[in-house]
Image (cartoon, grey):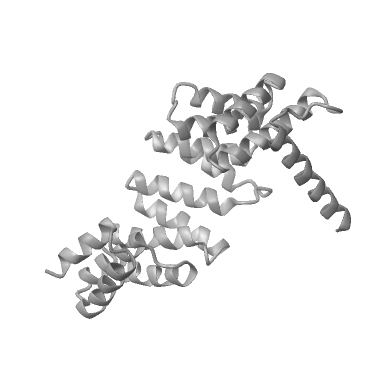
Amino acid sequence: MIKIIKASVLSVLIWLTACSTGGDYREGADLKKAAHFNVQLGSGYLAQNKLQLAKKKLTKALEQDPDNALAHSTMALLLEKVGQTEDIESHYEEAMSLDPENSDINNNFGTYLCNRGRFDEAQKLFKKAIDDPYYKTPVVAMINAGKCAMLNSNFELAESFFRRALRVDSRSSAALYYMAELGSKTNRYLMTRAYMQRYHTVVNPSAQSLWVQIQAENALDDKVFMRQLIQKIIKKFPDSDEAGKAMRLMR
């Protein structure tokens, strides 16, 4: 345990030094190791929304090691974020050819394909990630598969994925939210009420989640509870679009 902590501290120190100097980690390492480190830096910058720095590090990583699958997949994520669609798919395909069993890559590429209406291709990649016994975050792939099925109006399949995610993690806020949303889409408003109540025990209400619940209570004709929720959304999120919609229901 002590060695792990020391290694983590050392990694952080190296990270901070590299970030502060803007240099590339080359000394004492071959190009593949340097590329790996630049990918980690690029991923960190992407998470911080420092997109120019992320692009610089990922481009450098690909120059150092063109066969780094993670560099290709992370570059694809960056290009998606900035809306440069031209090379996204080629980076994902290269990443897949280099590391076809990488479940993170399968999940991310599946999400990309689903957002472009290529539902069957996307579901194959989600299934591959979900079926990987070593994948650390299968719930993420299950939820993405469910969202993709819902986008394709396959509500039965979507529900099966969300329920499967909840069997793994009963407090998954995303799965609870999408189950509530699915209830509304299929006119099962008691289901929406139940899952939104569970959702609000896991995370604080948002304007969006309160609006979903308000619509369900309106459909269930529970005017008393609906008005309580409307008062809540107006008080907590007075400038939100959802508050405006909710106020119109009171007229």
Check the image and report above or below for 108 versus 172.
above
Residue at left 65%, top 48%? Answer: 135
Front residue (pair 215, 31): 31
Residue at left 83%, top 27%? Answer: 27
Residue at left 87%, top 28%? Answer: 28
Left-right relation of 189 to 157: left
Left-right relation of 117 to 30: left
Observer able to see residue 186: no
Residue at left 49%, top 22%? Answer: 87
Check the image and report above or below for 171 versus 135.
below
Observer able to see residue 78: yes
Front residue (pair 34, 139): 34
Check the image and report above or below for 13 versus 18.
below
Instruction: Pick the quarter of the image with the N terminus.
Output: bottom right
Front residue (pair 236, 90): 236
Front residue (pair 214, 170): 214
The extreme left residue here reads: 251
Instruction: Pick the quarter of the image with the C terminus.
Output: bottom left
Please give the count of numbered marks on the rendered protein.
Answer: 0
> Where residue 218 sits: x, y (%)?
21, 70
> Where residue 124 sits: x, y (%)?
50, 38
> Where residue 12 sits: x, y (%)?
75, 46
The extreme bottom residue here reads: 224
The answer to which quarter of the image holds residue 71 is top right
> Where residue 123 sits: x, y (%)?
47, 41
